Amino acid sequence: MALDTDITRRRALLAGGGTLAFGGGVTYLASRPDSNPSDETYVPEMSNRSDETTGFGAELAGRPIAGDLNAPIDVYYWTDYLCPFCARFEAETLPKLGREYIDAGTARFVLLPYPTIGSYSMEAMVWSLCVWDVVADETPAAYWNWHHRVFERQSDAESGSDWATADAFATITDETADVPLADVEACREERSEAVRGPIQDDLDLGQSAGIQGTPGFVVYNRETDAAGRIVGAQPYDNFADAIEQVRNA
């Protein structure tokens, strides 16, 4: 798929105008992707917390960040744990993207909630952000292991989103090393509303940037304010091309 070579600045991207989507569009279907995901998963060499509001307008507080905080390129990743195309991206594209750009210090990868697919989408994100809150300071790799286990559970499900329940997430949490279920449950019980509140801001930011479904991405050069949008589970080469275009803009 040919990439659009136009680069836009932040204001144009947020306005949704112009030719700014890398890789063209992807048709979102209810059916599951028919490709066979690899067994490889990506756990970043470095993860960080930040209270920064980026030049693009992303609020990073409480959001999982993979990579060096000083990396010049941001990759914002809007996701939903009930999204089969997100599972496809995680299995087929993220491992190489992580090795070549995130671990190399070129890009930092920010996970942003976009819980719109099913009745448990929002609760799944509360689980995710509580897991991150509990482990981020001491064992951040445990968060990414948990995150990938959720997508593996989705991929193993026979159909639909019926797999996504409190019991399923509790089991995944309990079975993931270095993720204390009791602490995560305490976060869900005591801080659920505080965790939910900023998720609407993530949705609003994504929608203002033209993200209409998951997975959706914005590649943003924090030094030059150049940005581009990627829609769908695109292959690694499209991400690499988009990052290089924005990096050199």
Image (spheres, grey):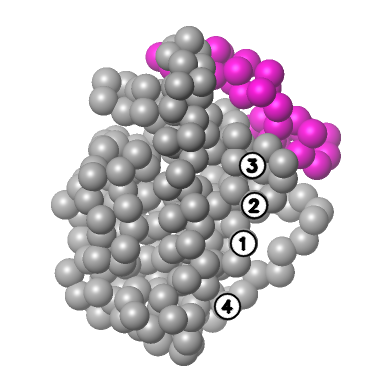
Secondary element at tag 1: loop
Q: Which residues are magenta?
A: 152-179
- Check if residue 35 falls in the magenta segment: no
Classify 183 as above or below 30.
above
- The amino acid type found where label 4 is placed reads Gly
Cα distance between the residues tagged 4 and 3: 26 Å
Secondary element at tag 2: loop
- The amino acid type found where label 1 is placed reads Gly
> What residue is pinned by disc 3?
121
Of tags 2 and 4, the one toward the viewer is: 2
Q: Which quadrant is the N terminus positioned in?
A: bottom right
Using the rendered image of the protein, determine whether residue 234 is visible from the camera's viewpoint: no
- Could you classify mark 1 by the number of other residues whose Cα lies within 10 Å: few (under 14), some (14-19), or many (20 or more)? many
- The amino acid type found where label 3 is placed reads Ser
Instruction: Tell me whether the residue at label 3 lies in contact with that at label 2, contact meaning CB atoms closer than 8 angstroms.
Output: yes
> What residue is pinned by disc 2?
116
- The amino acid type found where label 2 is placed reads Thr
Dot 3 or dot 1: first in sequence order is 3
- Could you classify mark 4 by the number of other residues whose Cα lies within 10 Å: few (under 14), some (14-19), or many (20 or more)? some
Dot 4 or dot 3: first in sequence order is 4
